[in-house]
Structure formats: C-alpha cells, structure tokens
Amino acid sequence: DKAGYKHFMAKEIAEQPAVITQTLQAYLDGDRIRLPEPGIDFASLDRLTLVACGTAHYACLTAKYWFEQLAALPVDIDVASEFRYREPPIPARTAAIFVSQSGETADTLAALRYAQGKAEMIGAVVNVAESTIARESDIVLPIHAGAEIGVASTKAFTCQLTVLLLLALKAAQDRGHLSDSDMAEKLGLVRSLPGILNQALAIEEPASDISRRLSEARDILFLGRGIMYPLALEGALKLKEISYIHAEAYASGELKHGPIALIDEHVPVIVMAPRDNLFDKTISNMQEVMARGGRILLISDQAGIEQAGSGVWSALPMPTVDPLLTPILYALPAQLLAYHTAVHKGTDVDQPRNLAKSVTVE
Ligand code: M6R
C-alpha cells in the first residue's frame, strides 16, 4: 500500500523520521544503549570487520569513520563478493558484522559463513529479523525500518546508519573513550534526528526543481570528503539505479588525481559539504571544478552556502546539525535527487530495469 504516494520509494523516504524513531526506541534506555542479547563487549575486541553489498556496504563505510573516530576501534570493510573469495585472515579478537536489509543476499551470507568459527563473534544488522543471515549470527541487531518495497534502498540505509552509530557510541563507552555525560550529550543529539529529518524533507520541492535540470545530464559526479565520501557513493548509486544516468562518486581529494579531466559545462557536480572540519577543503575542491566550467550543486547548510560564495549552479540548503548526524541527514538529499530525477525521466522508480530487491544469487 503506497499510502497515497506515487511510488513506494517516495513513501519510504517520507517515513524515515518515523522509522528512525522506532529504531531509537528499540536501542535506547534513558542514557544507555541497550543491545539485544548476548550484547557486544567492545572492550574485548581489537578489530571489527564490516561486510555487505551495495547500499548496505556504504552504510558500513560510513560507520568505519564513527568506530575509528569515536571508539578508536580499527575497522576493515569489504564488499561481500570480494571478501568471500579473498578469504582474508581474521585476526584474534575481531568481531565480524554483516549488514543486509533483506538478510538473504547470497554473497553476504557466504561471507558470513566464511567468518563463522574464525571471528570472535558474528553480528547481523538486518531489517528482516527472521532472515537466514540473522539466523546464522551470534547477535541480531534489527534496524526496525519496516518492510522496504522500493528496489532502491532508502529507509533501510538510514536505519542501518542509526544502528551502526549507536554501536559506535557503545563501543566508545565500552572502550573508555566516552564519559557518561558525553554519552548523554551524544544521545541527546541522536534523539533530535527524527525532528531534523522532518525539517529536511522540506527540501523536496527545490530538490525536484533541480532534478529536472539533472535529468538532462548524461554524466553526474558526486564529491564528498571524510564521512561524506560514502554518502557521495550512495548518492551516485541511487541515481544510477533508478534514473539510469551515469553517476560516479569521488573523495574530493582524489579529484586532481584523474577525474577532474572529465569536468566541463555538461557535467553537473554534486558536492556534499556540511560545515565540518573538512568544509574549507571541500569548498576549495569545488572551486577547482568551477574554474574548469563545471556546474556545481552545493549541498550544505545556509551558512555554508553563503560562505562558499557565488558562482554555484545551484544549492540545496540543509538544516544545521552537529557533525555526528550529517551522514544520516545528507542521505535525504541523495535520495530525493535520485527519486525526482527518475520521475522527471519517467523511469520505473520502484522496479528499475535489471535489478531485484533481494539478490539471492551471486
Ligand atoms: O538486502 P541487502 O541489504 O543485503 O541488499 C544489498 C544490496 O543489494 C542493496 O543495498 C542494493 O544495492 C540496493 N538496490 C541499493 O539501493
């Protein structure tokens, strides 16, 4: 049931404030993070391995920044199809966490089976709690997103990020990097997420206007630095899945190592630049693109857009938030731009060609 929306994807984008509220309810207990049994003692771990496919893989890439920055816990990341055949050594005191909306992705399941008996513990971050991946794990961490029908993953992504952020905060506390009062402060920020996401959904109209122009492009680049790099990857994946426009994402600092050769006035470049400690660097990369005639769509908050100065092709203002929350917040413009570009192009948004919701063959 699309509940009055034109597509499941539109409904699922709009549902995010509500489903994240459910996710938070399941994991928060006052100023504590409560994990399902048997829990995870992050103090006893030296490493994490996060493995997934597609959008779930980008959730893992994002979480790597959180685990490393908040908890000083080193994280290895891989796509499941590479991990399973590379057969990497898994050092002692490593927990392996597999992230999958469906819980049935063949490569992710095979990667999990490879890690069984080698990793200290196997965790599953899944939407379908009765799935095979969940059943074969030591700890099931449900994301509580509710059924996701659109082939392009949206609410599952932000709920995966929410669970992974809570795990990173728990890890920071277990490992002595977060005092009780700092934890209370961070959880206060996390609790503000649904309200902020609601506010951010107001960019739907400008996002649709911009998307009309994006829909005429043949190629689109996404740029992001630091924790925005995986968000740029997710934006490009979403766009190519449903609009069939060729899109690629780069870490902004990689631009001058090759991709800048692609820039001309026909290539829109979407820059994801919240005002964090890397903002100035991203903006200078953006100016390099502008100097070569590239058309910039800047996604930042109002102050960031003003600070970046004139000359951008377009800008999408986001609410101002603490850097802890930007990955989850900036998923919304990535989703909305892809959605509206696809709608302008008239493609089959919920059932894009050649794709299946659950990839149960390798
Ligand atoms: O069910 P899973 O999370 O394991 O699926 C993984 C990918 O197939 C999935 O995220 C895919 O990339 C989506 N179509 C992205 O929108």
Image: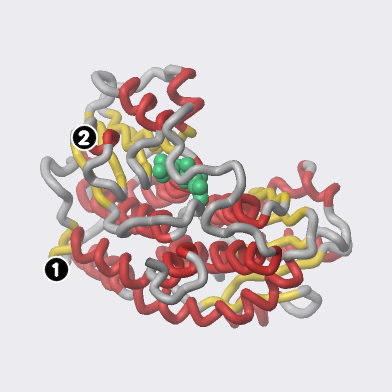
Please provide percent x and percent y for residue 127: 31, 50
The quadrant holding residue 293 is bottom right
Q: Label 2's element?
A: helix
Please provide percent x and percent y for residue 246: 72, 50
Q: Quadrant of the N terminus?
A: bottom left
Residue located farthest toward the left when viewing the structure as drawn: 37
Nearest the viewer among 325 and 37 is 37
Q: Earlier in the sequence, mark 1 or mark 2?
A: 1
Residue located farthest toward the front when viewing the structure as drawn: 1
Residue at 56%, 79% in the rendered image: 203
Q: Using the numbered discs, state the Cα–Cα distance from disc 1 to disc 2 in whole angstroms.
A: 29 Å
Residue at 63%, 80% in the rendered image: 206
Marks 1 and 2 in Cβ contact (< 8 Å): no
Please provide percent x and percent y for residue 98: 34, 37
Residue at 26%, 28% in the rendered image: 93
Residue 55 tag number: none
Relative height, residue 6 to residue 270 (above, below): below
**Dot 1, crowdedness within 10 Å: few (<14), some or many (≥20)?**
few
**Dot 2, crowdedness within 10 Å: few (<14), some or many (≥20)?**
few
Residue 135 tag number: 2
Marks 1 and 2: which is nearer the front?
Answer: 2
Nearest the viewer among 263 and 179 is 263
Q: Is mark 1 within 8 Å of ligand 1?
A: no
Q: Label 1's element?
A: loop
Check disc 2 and give the amino acid type. Arg
The answer to whether residue 308 is left or right of residue 6 is right
Please provide percent x and percent y for residue 349: 57, 59
Instruction: Tell me if residue 35 can be seen.
Output: yes
Residue at 77%, 54% in the rendered image: 219
Check disc 1 and give the amino acid type. Gly
- Read off the residue under disc 1: 30
Instruction: Tell me if residue 177 can be seen.
Output: no
